[in-house]
Image (spheres, rainbow, N blue to C red):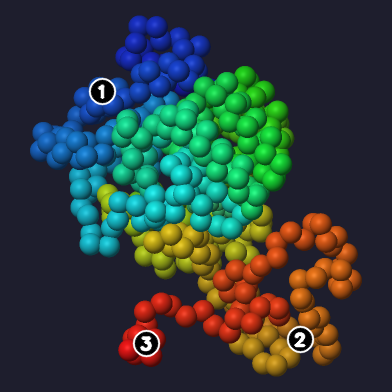
């Protein structure tokens, strides 16, 4: 496929009289000419929606606005657009107004787990840092739909400085995940400044950026941007491809530039009804990703955010997809299927069961073909009592590298040195009776 297709040329000419390839590939031109209303959408794709449908859509847009880059729009099949995965991810649906009683504005409690605006500190050693609340396109399945188009929530520089201060003063944080919105909506110099500030914090070991630019606006990955990013290794990038059709000549080019700059690339896919809820689509997607040096990282169960009911599948669909991947294709191409726990519990991995049974010295397992097999455990294995004093241990970890000294959660129940026997929920009826 060519970098600039005939269809893209046609769309560019309709958008503006300055339609030339160099403008089309200019990310700022793309953002300036983003499609923000239904009439423009119809005219550019030469489609016509009936008037009842339009009225419903206007109501949806009043709540959840529309924005789509000319590039991403150009990928929509204008004949069979109703079934088009790119159309479904970018064009509003009246179903977005259906709110089920389990839906929440902020299902992951990102705002509650926020010690300072912009930071979500959920896990012991890493934080999510929202540095931008704008995107080049509004994904209809956005989990942060509550913030889309909310101009008041664009973080000011002072807010970002406070976030950096928070990270500076928390020496447990070794991994910072820049997210948004899309961090690549920010100017290169500003990103350079944030990355420099974070890089100067001695306990920050890695920085990650979550961006959908390679998918929806690949021209944002300019040589200048890549030069900036290269200065800040170790830097990891996660992007967000959901369907093999999104992997185009232009997006491949963007991925190539990032990979050539030595940036490890990952991908987070959301399982979406009518878009990619099929193991053949998913397999095609992950194969195309690894061909472009992108490691599939997570497959997300769709969150319980308001306005996403029509995108959700049963968990069984995700497990079925995983069953069709594990063993059937390269291990490194397989993402981890996760549910981000409502209420802020973090990501919980799920997959089919492979462990069938267990005795004192044998484990019964099944493989992807249905072969049932046994693994004989060692007759002698001397468990070493671990008191977290690495000086006493022969595994050769120097003490100054063994900084974490406490156990958390289930790991705490497993460890030797902590006396905790059980994790008990607060306010059980039984415990309330004891207190009476
Ligand atoms: C997903 C997420 C992370 C990173 O989790 P990993 O499993 O390390 O990728 C960190 N903080 C928050 C709040 C998250 O949602």
Pick whichever of labels 3 and 2 is earlier in the sequence: 2
Residue at the disc numbered 1: 40
Depth check, mark 3 against mark 2: the one in front is 3
Q: Residue at x 60, y 45 (%)?
A: 169
Outermost residue, front side: 436
Residue 244: % across, % down: 50, 43
Could you tell me how many numbered marks the image carries?
Answer: 3
Pick whichever of labels 3 and 1 is earlier in the sequence: 1
Nearer the observer, 435 or 327? 435
CA gap, disc 3 and disc 1: 65 Å
Residue 157: % across, % down: 47, 28
Residue at the disc numbered 3: 435
Please indicate whether residue 263 sits to the left or right of residue 141 in the image: right
Residue at the disc numbered 2: 376
Nearer the observer, 228 or 258? 228
The secondary element bearing badge 3 is classed as helix
Q: Residue at x 76, y 86 (%)?
A: 376
Residue 306 in view here: yes
Residue 281: % across, % down: 48, 51
- Which class describes the residues within 10 Å of circle 1: few (<14), some (14-19), or many (20+)? some
């Amino acid at each position: 496929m060519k970098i600039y297709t005939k269809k893209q040329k046609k769309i560019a000419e309709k958008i503006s009289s300055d339609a030339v390839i160099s403008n089309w590939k200019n990310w700022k031109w793309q953002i300036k000419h983003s499609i923000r209303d239904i009439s423009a959408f119809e005219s550019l794709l030469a489609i016509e929606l009936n008037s009842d449908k339009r009225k419903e859509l206007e109501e949806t847009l009043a709540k959840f606005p529309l924005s789509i880059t000319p590039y991403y729009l150009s990928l929509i099949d204008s004949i069979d657009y109703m079934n088009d995965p790119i159309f479904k991810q970018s064009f509003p649906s009246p179903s977005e107004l259906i709110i089920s009683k389990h839906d929440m504005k902020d299902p992951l409690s990102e705002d509650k787990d926020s010690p300072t605006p912009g930071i979500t500190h959920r896990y012991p050693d890493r934080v999510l840092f929202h540095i931008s609340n704008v995107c080049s396109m509004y994904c209809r399945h956005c989990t942060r739909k509550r913030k889309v188009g909310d101009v008041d929530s664009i973080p000011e520089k002072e807010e970002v400085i406070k976030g950096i201060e928070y990270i500076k003063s928390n020496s447990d944080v070794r991994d910072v995940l820049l997210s948004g919105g899309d961090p690549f909506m920010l100017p290169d110099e500003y990103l350079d400044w944030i990355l420099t500030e974070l890089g100067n914090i001695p306990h920050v070991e890695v920085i990650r950026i979550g961006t959908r630019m390679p998918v929806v606006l690949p021209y944002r990955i300019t040589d200048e941007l890549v030069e900036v990013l290269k200065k800040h290794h170790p830097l990891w990038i996660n992007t967000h491809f959901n369907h093999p059709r999104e992997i185009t000549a232009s997006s491949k080019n963007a991925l190539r530039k990032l990979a050539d700059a030595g940036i490890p690339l990952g991908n987070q896919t959301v399982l979406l009804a009518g878009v990619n809820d099929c193991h053949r689509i998913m397999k095609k997607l992950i194969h195309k990703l690894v061909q472009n040096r992108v490691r599939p990282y997570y497959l997300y169960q769709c969150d319980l955010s308001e306005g996403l009911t029509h995108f959700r599948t049963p968990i069984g669909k995700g497990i079925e997809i995983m069953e069709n991947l594990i063993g059937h294709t390269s291990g490194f191409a397989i993402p981890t299927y996760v549910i981000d726990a409502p209420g802020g519990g973090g990501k919980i991995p799920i997959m089919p069961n492979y462990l069938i049974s267990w005795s004192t010295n044998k484990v019964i397992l099944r493989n992807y073909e249905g072969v049932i097999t046994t693994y004989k455990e060692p007759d002698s294995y001397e468990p070493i009592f671990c008191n977290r004093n690495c000086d006493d241990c022969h595994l050769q970890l120097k003490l100054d590298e063994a900084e974490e000294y406490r156990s958390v959660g289930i790991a705490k129940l497993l460890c030797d040195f902590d006396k905790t026997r059980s994790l008990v929920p607060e306010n059980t009826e039984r415990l309330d009776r004891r207190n009476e």
